Structures are given as C-alpha cells and as structure tokens.
Image (tube, rainbow, N blue to C red):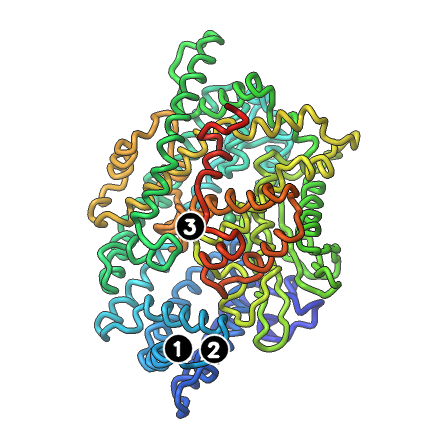
Amino acid sequence: MSNPLLTAWSTPHETPPFEQIKPEHFLPAFEQAFADHKAEIDAIVSDPAKPDFDNTVTALERSGKLLQKVSAVFYALVGAYSNPELLEVEKEVALRETRHWNPIMMNAALFARITRLHDARALLKLTPEQKRLLERTWTRFHRAGAGLSDTAKTRMAEINERLAHLATDFSHHLLGDEQAWTLELGAEDRDGLSASFVAAAEAAAAERNRPDKAVVTLSRSSVEPFLQSSTRRDLREKVYRAFTARGDNGNANDNTADIVEILKLREERARLLGYDTYAAYRLEDSMAKTPAAVRELLERVWVPARAKAMADRGALQELIAEEGGNFQLAPWDWRFYAEKLRRTRANFDDASIKPYLALEGIIAACFDTAHQLFGLTFTERKDVPVWHPDVRVWEVKSADGRHQALFYGDYFARASKRSGAWMTSLRDQQKLDGDVAPLILNICNFAKGSGSEPALLSPDDARTLFHEFGHALHGMCSNVVYPSLSGTSVFTDFVELPSQLYEHWQERPEVLQKFAKHYQTGEPLPDDLLKRFLAARKFNQGFATVEYVSSALIDLEFHSRPAAAAEDVHAFETKVLEGIGMPDEIKLRHRPQQFGHIFSGDHYAAAYYSYMWSEVMDADAFGAFEEAGNIFDPAVAKRLHDDIYSSGGSRDPEEAYVAFRGRKPEPEALLRRRGLVETPEAA
Ligand SMILES: [Zn+2]
C-alpha cells in the first residue's frame, strides 16, 4: 500500500506518475509533508549557532520540499481535473494548510533570526539575489504578522483560517452554479450559430450524458460566442441573465454573504498590522505602492474608454433602428450588434478567420516565436504521464541543446475543469541543490473539434494561448538560485508583463502569415483578410476596457472603503457603478458574486488592476522591438530574456524594467494600442 506521492518518481524527468495518484493519497501525503516541514522549521529555530544567511534563510529555502511537491500536484488536479472526492479533500486541505502555515509565519523565534540578519544586511556580503531574498523573506514574515503580540497573533490565525474556508467556499459555489445550468438548443434555437459552435455545444451535451443534444453552458467560451452570434434575442437574454447571476441566485451557492464576511475579515487583518484599509496593506507590497497610484492609472484609462463606449453605443442603437428594430439596446444585445457592426465597418467577423486558426498552427506559432526570440526548441514527448488523455507534453531545450523544461498543454474544455485559462507549475526552476528544471503547465478551455474538423480557435482564444504561453516562458526561462524567487514569483502587478507582452507577436503579420493556414486547403491567411483582422482588433475596445476597468475600480472600492460600507453588496455595486457613470448597457466583466479573482483567494484582491498596470509596461516594452525595426531583434530579445523572462523575483521589478527599456514605462502606448486616442496613422 505505498503512496505514490511519498515515493521517489522513476518517470522521465521525475514527473508525477498521474495514473497511480488517487484522491485518497492526498490527505496522508499532506500529513507527512506538514510533519516533515514542521521538523525542518523546528531545526532552524532551535539551531544553537548564531543566525547567518545559510543556517536561516537558505535553510528556509530548502525546507518544505515534500509539501511543495504534493501541493503542486494537488492544485493542478483541483483546477484541471477535479471530481467531488477531490473537492471534498480540498476543503480539508485548505483548513490544514492554514493551520500549518500560521504558526510558521508567526513564529517569533524564527522571525527574530530573520530580523537580525535583515538589520545587518548591509554587512553580510551577499550577492544581489541573496540580498533580494533576505528582503523578500523578512517582508513576507513581517506582513504575515510575525512581529505582532500573542493576542493579535491568535486573532490573526483565526482570521486566516476563516478566510481560507471562505475562499474555497466561494469557488465551489461558483462551480456549483456553473455546473447546474445549461440551455438546450433545439433545431429552431440555432439561428445565427456557426457550425463549430453547434459542434462544441453537442460535445458539451455528450459530456453531460445527453447524447444527440446540444447545450450552451455557463463557461465564458460558450457564453461569449453565443451572445455574439445568436439571432434569438430571447435566448440571448436568458443566457446573459444566467451568466451574470452566477453565485447570486439566492440558492445554496449564493456568494453574497461570503463577500461581506471576507471584506470584514480582510479589513480586520489589515488593522491588526497597522493599516487603515486592506488596499493600503495589499498595495504597499506591489509596484504601484498606493491605492492613489492605482486609481490614477484606472481613471486615466476610464475617461477615454467610457467616451469611446458611449459613441459605440450610439452606433449600435442606430444599427438596430436601421434594421427596423424598435427596442433599446440591452446588455445582451451589445456583443451581437457590435459583431454586426464590425462585419460592416471593418468588414470582418471572427468566423471568417477561424478556419485559419487551427489550434495546432497557433501552438506552432507560439513555439516558433520563442525559438526566434530565445532560441528555444520544442519536441513532443509521448512517454511522460499525464492526468487526462487530452494533455500533451513537450520537452523544451535551450539554444545550446540543454534540457530546460517540460511543458504540459491541456487545451480543451471539460466539466471537470474550472473555467478560464491559466499557467501553473508542477515543479519550479532553482539551482540551490543542482540544476532543477521546471515542469510548466498551460490550462485552457477551448472547444474541441469534432469529426473531421480540428479544434479551431477564435481570435480571442488564439490571444489567450499566447498569453498563457508568455506566463509559461516566465516559468521555463527562469534562471535563479533560490526557489522562492523562481519564475512567476514576482509582484502581481508585474506578473502579467511577460504574458501580455507575448500577445503582441500573435497579432503580427510576420507570425500569422507563417502559421495561420486554412485547415482544409492549407492556403495561408489572405493578405486582405489579415489586414481587416488587424484593423478589427481595435474595434469595440471601448466596451472591453469599460468592462475591465469598472471591475478593477469596484475591487479597489471594496478594499479601500470601510468594510461596513459594503454590508449590502448589491447596493454597493449599484452605487459604485453610478459613481463612475457606468453605461447601462455594459455590466462588470466580473460581478461581485462571480469575482473569483478577488474572492476565491486573496491573490488579486485589491490587485485586479494589475492587468492594466502590466499592460502599460507590455505596450511600452513592445515598442522597443518596433523601434529596432525587427520584432525579433536579437539585442532587444537578449535584454528581454535576461532582464524580464529569466530573472524571476530576483530583482526589483522597476529596476528590471528600466534595465530592459532604458527608462520607466509610459502609458501612451497602451491608449494607442486600444485605439482610445488618435494615432498618427489614423489621424
Ligand atoms: Zn495572465
């Protein structure tokens, strides 16, 4: 009865042997991992030797290996291939983890050792990476409450435990509401829908044991194209209402009460640590530093974005009138008429380019771009164990032929996968004890092809693929010594730079002409269609920006006002939206009850703005290639690799950016790219 999580792995590159790992293995493995880690921490604390960098900071970096190994496999499965048994285990694990980490992060003796070193850091003769590690370690403990009184620590531990429970609860509720709803499409309900949409709807029905039917589900990749193309206004309204009511249905999955409690507990935690609001606490440890800096950026973008959306709203209403429609544009009409307008104005629709965007071709484009920029090569491996037959694995080699990483791609939607797209790792790069090569994952929710048709991506899907692959490169190119500084272990408002920057190559003619080929004829993307596609990219950006920035603003309001102000979540939502002049026909991209980014964990809490903060940098950063006159310019690419993609958290992000670009980022490039200001060419 050996537990595969507790034995050494003899698989290629010591990858997890997924076919042997069962849900019942996790709890005992976590128990063992907690016990091992606790013993390692105890040994550091009780070390009679005077604290030095090696016996304290490095020892901490070496601790918890088993815990990292077990957690990585567990959370990869919870996200990408869960089942009721695993979700039950998750509730238990979330609680145990908090109980395990609280006493470590608030250990006074351990913190005293770290503080002693931190105080003397100027005299320790550390490498720049070691200096950064010491600063980050001290900050992490300090911000977790290691310096608080015992009473405050006890309360802090209670808060953390309760917050962990609420975060899991929030995401389970959301998943519950998403799984509970489908809309069956009869023959008369399919008007306007593309053949590939119907095929995906049939696959979704088959997966739910309803063969020979077709269903719309509440995953974004089903809802968005439906709202864009269904001519049935009544069904659009139905789908839209169900989508925006997730977690807000007054049933057992309702998240409203959770939100109120989460906000109160976060505020209390911030106060214990000496901050007025959670946002002030959260943002101190970011590039932005203060709520005021975040608000300034968001407002700078909000004003032109809203103006653009209002102008577009007028055009959509006109289009309705031209068609003889006698109704006011509603939120469930926006995408439909915007798509129509795009077809007439930019003479482009997603369906015309889809046949050229086969998943296989876009994966090849991702790999080729990484090859041209950083010299990486990718070879598919069939001998590495995976968690689901759809998962594929590639070996990544560096320019000099060295093994650099394994890359796992899990691209297709299924009911056992949570919605969205993300990157994660099964093992991070580090060099503390030998060269550890990373195992990096991209998880997406694309519709599968059916019959003889391969999986075809929408332009948004193609962009998502590049985005997540940009994160993957951040993990795979990582070249640091210490594990806690590896890859994506950077500030939240910096972490989207490598991913969003990578999206720029996806929309370049040099890349599309080479890899976007018609899946039936093999003919390359015609020039004229390519031009219309690129022009159409700026279309409806007012809407997209308003949807996003309003969500970022409500996140900031939730966390920078007293928690008591949001006691009535619905009233709070209305008030914030009125305050910013939200157009009635556009809703938040994530309504509070669905806002997993900020409530299923605190990673993006008071930090949803991060995407836009990073976008200022990515738009500005790509300018370096444009200025060089070559999107693969070797000198710029080398700086990009050395300063951004490989340095992980080993440097201050602003310093790393300035090293790459020669100056601080400027937001004009972002506004131009989104078409929110006149560009010289367009004027
Ligand atoms: Zn991202």
Rate crowding at label 1 as few (under 14), some (14 to 19) or many (20 or more) other CA atoms within 10 Å.
Answer: some
The answer to whether residue 413 is seen in the rendering is: no
Where is mark 3, residue-wise?
171
Q: Secondary structure at mark 2?
A: loop
The Cα atoms of the two marked residues, 2 and 3, are separated by 42 Å
* Residue at x 54%, y 50% (from the top left corner): 422
Q: Which mark is residue 121?
A: 1
Residue 231 coordinates in the image, percent (x, y): 52, 19
* Residue at x 38%, y 80% (from the top left corner): 117
- Mark 2 and mark 1 lie on one chain; the one further toward the N terminus is 1
Decide if residue 252 is on the left or right side of residue 628: left
Vertical placement of 39 versus 206: above or below?
below
Q: Secondary structure at mark 3?
A: helix
The Cα atoms of the two marked residues, 2 and 1, are separated by 8 Å
Q: Could you tell me if the residues under marks 2 and 1 are in contact, i.e. CB atoms within 8 Å?
A: yes
Q: Is 600 in front, or is 107?
A: 107
Q: Amino acid at mark 1?
A: Arg
